[in-house]
Image (spheres, rainbow, N blue to C red):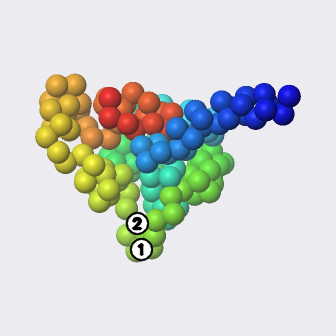
């Protein structure tokens, strides 16, 4: 009986360990963040930026990359709290934290080769911020090459 339980437990854990690889990040789990951010673009996973970046982004929603994405103070505060609590561990200089995921060194390094250029042209990707154009699991935190 113990052996059967052990086998069953192992079978459940294998898919979980497969998901915890270098091409995945924890998905957005906050419904308010999914709703508000996802209304205009993919709700980016908080782990992509440090807390200082999310705080700056949320503080400047009236000019959110050229758009007015203003929210009422309560909604903005709830989303900012979620993003900061789940933010990446990278350090950011307080004076100028990174605001664009696409400008980070790891991002430019991962998206530099000829395959990415081919995908960019052949999938009609309009912007590098459109993760789901090439990574079908982006919304769920999976960024393996498709």
Find out whether the residues at labels 2 and 1 contact each other: C-beta distance under 8 Å. yes
Q: Is residue 41 toward the left or the right of residue 59 in the image?
A: left
Q: Residue 17: x and y, percent? A: 57, 41
Mark 2 neighbour class, 10 Å CA radius: few under 14, some 14 to 19, many 20 or more: some
Q: Residue 124: x and y, percent? A: 20, 26
Q: Is residue 122 visible?
A: yes
- The residue beneath circle 1 is 93
Q: Residue 127: x and y, percent? A: 25, 37
Tell me the distance, in whole angstroms, between the alpha carbons under discs 2 and 1. Answer: 5 Å
Total numbered labels: 2
Q: Quadrant of residue 99?
A: bottom left
Image quadrant occupied by the C terminus: top left
Q: Residue 135: x and y, percent? A: 36, 32
Residue most extreme to the right: 1
| Residue sitting nearer the eye, 119 or 61 | 119
At 60% from the left edge and 35% from the top edge, which residue is drawn?
14
Q: Quadrant of residue 28?
A: top right
- The residue beneath circle 2 is 97
| Residue sitting nearer the eye, 70 or 117 | 117
At 19% from the left edge and 48% from the top edge, which residue is drawn?
112
- Mark 2: secondary structure: loop
Mark 1 neighbour class, 10 Å CA radius: few under 14, some 14 to 19, many 20 or more: few
Q: Is residue 32 visible?
A: no
Q: Is residue 47 toward the left or the right of residue 8 in the image?
A: left
């Amino acid at each position: 009986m113990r052996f059967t339980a052990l086998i069953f437990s192992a079978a459940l854990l294998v898919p979980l360990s497969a998901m915890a690889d270098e091409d995945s990040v924890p998905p957005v789990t906050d419904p308010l963040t999914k709703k508000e951010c996802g209304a205009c673009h993919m709700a980016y996973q908080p782990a992509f930026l440090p807390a200082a970046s999310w705080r700056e982004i949320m503080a400047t929603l009236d000019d959110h990359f050229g758009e007015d994405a203003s929210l009422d103070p309560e909604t903005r505060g709830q989303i900012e709290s979620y993003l900061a609590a789940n933010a990446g561990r990278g350090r950011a200089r307080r004076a100028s934290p990174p605001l664009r995921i696409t400008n980070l060194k790891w991002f430019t390094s991962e998206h530099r080769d000829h395959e990415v250029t081919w995908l960019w042209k052949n999938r009609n990707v309009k912007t590098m911020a459109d993760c789901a154009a090439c990574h079908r699991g982006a919304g769920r935190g999976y960024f393996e090459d498709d």
